Amino acid sequence: MKNSETKSYRVVGLMSGTSLDGLDIAYCLFWEENNKWRFKIPVAHTYDYPQIWKSRLRSAVSMSGQELVQLNNEYGRYLGELANTFILDNSLHPDLIASHGHTVFHQPEAGLTFQIGSGAEITAVTGITVVCDFRSQDVALGGQGAPLVPIGDKMLFGEFDFCLNLGGFSNISFEENDVRKAFDICPVNIALNYLSQKLGVEFDKDGALASSGTFCNSLFNALNGLPFYAVEGPKSLGWEWLQAQFLPLLDDDNSPVKDKLRTTIEHIAYQISLKTNKISDGKILVTGGGAFNKFLINRIGDLNNNTLIIPEDKIINFKEALIFAFLGLLRYLNKPNCLASVTAATTDHSSGAIYSL
């Protein structure tokens, strides 16, 4: 139980994923107990993006510099307004807001990463201290700027052998020789949704469309042959890579869309199994929107030597918002929140810009 004298921190985490589903907001409590960080998520909510914001965020990558700066500010103000709504509706009194922002560019090999959603605007709207821009310093230190979640996996979910996130992209983290390792594996929802929308639906509920398709061996081999998969971690994926290398393989294939969905599911399950089957009888914590895709989960399970653990919905949906809230707290406390073993930066460091009134 939490001691009444234990210092507890109240943090609101904001997470916008590459799938453009909406903004996840989680109100999180953190405290230290027996030299271990503990947490609770008393309340959380996803605010679906209206079509205008989906369109603006989707087109951000091709905007002019001035348009992008303006979008950065306007999106920050929008995030602040949604945070205010969440805070007021739930009568909350947070110490801190931690905002991931929305990734527009992620090209660490070019020393470039950019997440929009101005922290200055969020602070101006809410009056609350904000931590944001978690990736830039890591890239400046020679790192990938991603994935950043693994330190949260290590400190909050350390009882699992693997933490697997099935979001826009899949990423995984685990301990190897007492060092935290993590990297992106492959596209998941960002590719599945791309195909589903060709059939007139936003996403493939439960993987029903994919399960009705036929496996295509030539497409499967083409996807698995992408050079990214031959590179050892640390490594990360972004929208630019997807557009340049992954989606053209889907578009150039003449198979029916359902067959492409079926084959992409198999590709995802196969790539994940290559990473997790290095051990047997371990426990894999599975979170992110893909955890609700029953067909995908079944295929991952079928190809795996380990047990998949699907947690309560709140953890599935809000684990990344929770962990970015935690990263924001670590930055606020000036403690390391980026691991060199994960991102390949020159050193562990405390990353994030802080805005306060």
Image (cartoon, rainbow, N blue to C red):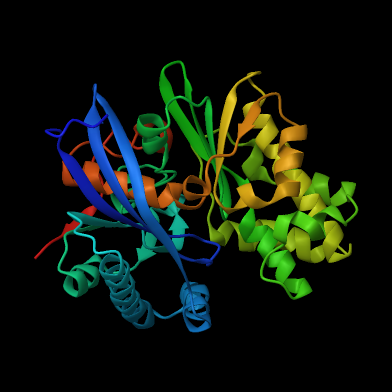
Give residue 95's position: percent from left, percent from top.
Answer: 17, 54
Give residue 298's position: percent from left, percent from top.
Answer: 75, 40
Give residue 251's position: percent from left, percent from top.
Answer: 77, 66
The answer to whether residue 187 shows anywhere in this view is no
> What is the tally of numbered marks visible in this picture?
0
- Residue found farthest to the top: 177
The residue under the point 70% across, 43% down is 297
In this orientation, which residue lies closer to the viewer: 91 or 15? 91
Q: Is residue 4 left or right of residue 27?
A: left
Q: Is residue 54 above or below residue 155?
A: below
In this orientation, which residue lies closer to the viewer: 88 or 291? 88
The image quadrant of residue 355 is bottom left
Image quadrant holding the C terminus, namely: bottom left
Image quadrant holding the N terminus, namely: top left
Give residue 13's position: percent from left, percent from top.
Answer: 33, 55
The image quadrant of residue 257 is bottom right
Q: Is residue 289 left or right of residue 35?
A: right
The residue under the point 76% across, 40% down is 299
Q: Is residue 6 left or right of residue 257?
A: left
The residue under the point 26% across, 70% down is 88
